[in-house]
Amino acid sequence: MIKVLFVCMGNICRSPTAEGIFRQVVDDAGLADKIDIDSAGTHSYHIGKQPDARAQSASRNRGIDLSNLRGRQVEPSDFDKFNYIIAMDNSNHADLTQVAGGSADNLFMFLSFSENFNEEEVPDPYYGGEQGFEHVLDLVEDASRGLLAHIQKLHNL
């Protein structure tokens, strides 16, 4: 089983969106029994809470239901449990590097898997308007396809 963990700061906008979108991409590829998907935050602000209502609404408009997801904080043991820990931005990557104790071979920037965007970070839409959530979805959908292609190639799936 390949295990993928998406991480943003609070685990209520970007990382649950990525979890939901990537789960759909994996399901569509018929690989749900081979890839396990989760999300977490680098901070403890929203442990146990549902994703942001705007993230849920934007995702629901694209056929993805995030309502059953709950926020959790990343733990050092996640670096042993997951094959891929996917950071949404440079700040999250730096925080995750500290959690890992200095470095981790399984830590990646999400948009490094993007095929159609040149951006390096998935921007935090929390303090912006609806368009920010739509842009996050566009980035996440693209990077999710690229991540799955990478996993399929590397793990012969």
Image (cartoon, rainbow, N blue to C red):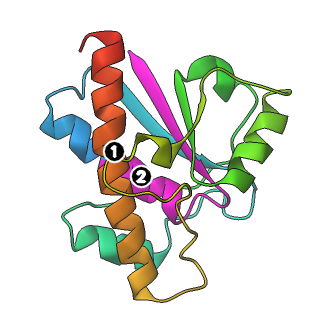
Residue 149 location, quadrant: top left
- The residue positioned 75% from the left and 55% from the top of the image is 43
Identify the magenta region: 1-21
Circle on res. 69:
none
Which residue position holds label 2? 18
Percent coordinates x, y for residue 35 in the rendering = 34, 25
The answer to whether 143 is drawn above or below residue 49 in the figure is above
The disc labelled 1 sits on which kind of residue?
A: Ser
Is residue 91 found left or right of 124 in the rendered image? Answer: right
The answer to whether 143 is drawn above or below residue 150 in the figure is below
How many marks on residues?
A: 2
Is residue 8 found left or right of 139 in the rendered image? Answer: right
- The residue positioned 56% from the left and 58% from the top of the image is 121
The 10 Å Cα crowd at callout 2, few under 14, some 14 to 19, many 20 or more, is many
Which residue position holds label 1? 144
Q: Are marks 2 and 1 in contact (CB under 8 Å)?
A: yes
Dot in front, 2 or 1: 1
Q: Quadrant of the N terminus?
A: top left
Percent coordinates x, y for residue 98 in the rendering = 84, 37
Residue 27 location, quadrant: top left
> What SS does tag 1 mark?
helix
| Residue at the outermost front position | 118
- For the residue pair 75 and 102, the one nearer the viewer reads as 102
The answer to whether 120 is drawn above or below residue 107 in the figure is below
Query: CA–CA distance between discs 2 and 1?
Result: 8 Å
- The residue positioned 18% from the left and 63% from the top of the image is 63
